[in-house]
Amino acid sequence: AEKIRVEAEKLNIAGEIAAGVAHEIRNPLTVISGFVQMMKADKNSPNYYYFSLINEEIERINLIISEFLVLSKPHAKEMTIFDIHDILNHVKLLFDPQFQSHHIILTEELLAEYSHIKGDANQIKQVFINIFKNAIEAIDDTGHMNVETKWTGTHIAIAISDSGNGMSQKVIDHIFEPFFTTKEHGTGLGMLITNKIIQEHGGVINIDSMFGQGTTITIMMPVHSNELMPIH
Ligand code: ADP
Ligand code: MG
């Protein structure tokens, strides 16, 4: 009982339980999903349309659970020192098929002299995945994206721009709120997670956008101090 009380002080118990429940929901969901796949295998079934809808909704639950689990994970950060340029290049590769199918031209200028940070590389990767995903969804079809990094003298600034539909001030004001979405199939968790991860790494995120004009998301991160003291 003593141990539990101490932990309750340190951790958000409600959040931990919710994460555990979310995780447990996955198992029965996998079983349901398996049977639905089986039922919708027969395209001539009179219920094919309904099975497809069930399947879509199961995928949606899975997406929400995945995002929720990312959100509740920060307790288990795996800290390493890594190059943010490597992460950007990796995420760029992941999205290559989507850039092609959406006719998006990506340009980049990774100019920051210092680009190593200390943190959880998987979480930082998740940040860029969330931002790239939003950019692609905002562009819809045909457009461009630009990724830029530069050293400000104190931080690395990473700016990700898209020529998509942009945001009104009202959307910007609510963008970090849980479940805030303007999309039919959005979860409204991506930017909340992004903001939380960046804050936990000592960084800040800035949104510069205008409705109909595209968006630039800028992230400022402190770099790993060893890099600032080069050995001569
Ligand atoms: P979701 O993508 O599931 O809607 P997010 O938290 O990722 O949730 O984003 C919240 C909302 O912010 C989106 O629904 C959209 O309205 C707006 N948004 C985020 N990024 C962009 C962007 N690059 N261009 C236009 N709107 C954006
Ligand atoms: Mg999103």
Image (cartoon, grey):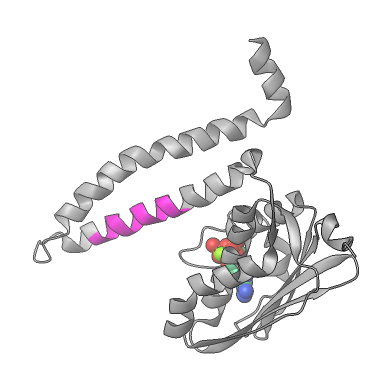
227 versus 78 height, above or below:
below
Provide the residue span drawn in magenta.
52-63
Q: Is residue 78 magenta?
A: no
Which residue shows up at 26% across the image and 44% down it?
Answer: 32
Work out which quarter of the rendered image holds the N terminus and state it. top right
Which residue shows up at 65% across the image and 51% down it?
Answer: 120
Ligand 1's quadrant is bottom right
101 relative position to 223: left or right: left
Which residue shows up at 56% across the image and 69% down it?
Answer: 90
Residue 27 place in picture, x, y as percent: 34, 38
Residue 31 place in picture, x, y as percent: 26, 42
30 relative position to 63: left or right: left
Name the foreground residue: 201 vs 185.
201
Name the foreground residue: 49 vs 73.
73
170 versus 12 height, above or below:
below
Residue 230 place in picture, x, y as percent: 87, 63
What is the chief secondary structure element of the magenta stretch? helix
Asked whether residue 181 is in view, the answer is: no
44 relative position to 210: left or right: left
Q: Quadrant of residue 171?
A: bottom right
213 versus 98 height, above or below:
below
